[in-house]
Amino acid sequence: MMLEISLKPSLCDWPEVTEQWNCWRKDKSHIRAKLHREYIRKSDWLLTTHAASEAALRRILFIGLRQKHVPYKKVQDWMDNHHITFGIVNGYGTYVTYFDELYSQNWENTLKTVDDLPELWTLWNNYAKPIRNHLAHAARKYKDDWLEAALAIDRLFMMKLDKAINPLIGGTPFADLRLLSPRLPGGDNNILPERVLNIRSRNTRPKTSLDDGRAKLQIICEGVNG
């Protein structure tokens, strides 16, 4: 599969993006926590930065559920145990559909509030994400210029997304949530994520018992050693 990238001239200065990124992320504790301190290869930068961008998107859903009075633990459990499909299309189980259920301003119109953000969302899905997937599964190697472009897309996407979401929640979604104004409301144990999102309890992530996994692994290791 051939990937093509077409960025506006205003988005194409990678050193300038890096400078903006280093300044922006200083007070974004949620993003910094996802990034490694040291990297051996440029692909490592992309893998962790793209993971941070997915965490950023999930954080916005987390805040939306908390704004609907879903208790913290119920939100966290749902986020941990349910798969969310990231992509341009909407439909059952997709990020766009969940966002539209949670916020008064839908995803498409939210993107339009910040210059270049709709284009970056498309590039995030059609360029950066496929490259990340290929690297994560060792399906393909990329030269540095490809990785640098994908990295710039991920960084610009998060910075501009922050700007778009800020007015909807009263602050940045990527720092201490206690700084939001107004503060997130208290939780009501009678309100469930599924009820708020208007979905059935599906898309649960596969679960496996640690004890069962270790026991079976021990049997395999004993056979190898024997």
Image (tube, grey):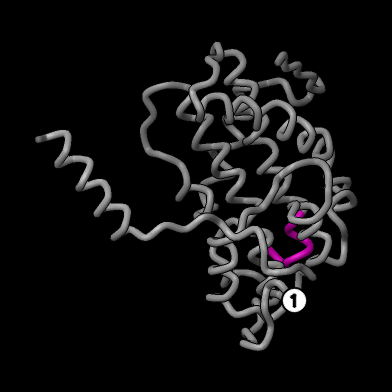
Q: Is residue 193 above or below residue 190?
A: above
Report the front residue among 108 and 132.
132
Amino acid type, label 1:
Arg
Rendered-image quadrant of the C terminus: top left
Q: Is 183 on the left or on the right of 46, as rendered?
A: right
Residue 179: percent from left, percent from top? 59, 69
**Residue drawn at 61 percent across, 35 percent down:** 20
Residue 190: percent from left, percent from top? 66, 88
**Residue drawn at 75 percent across, 42 percent down:** 87
Q: Is 104 on the left or on the right of 137, as rendered?
A: right
The crowding category of the residue bearing disc 1, from other C-alpha atoms within 10 Å (few below 14, some 14 to 19, many at least 20), is: few
Q: Is residue 165 above or below residue 41?
A: below
Identify residue for label 1.
195
Q: Main secondary structure of the magenta part?
A: helix
**Residue drawn at 73 percent across, 58 percent down:** 166
Q: Is residue 71 above or below residue 151?
A: below
Report the front residue among 123 and 174.
123
- Image: magenta residue range: 165-172
Q: Is residue 8 magenta?
A: no
Q: Is residue 169 magenta?
A: yes
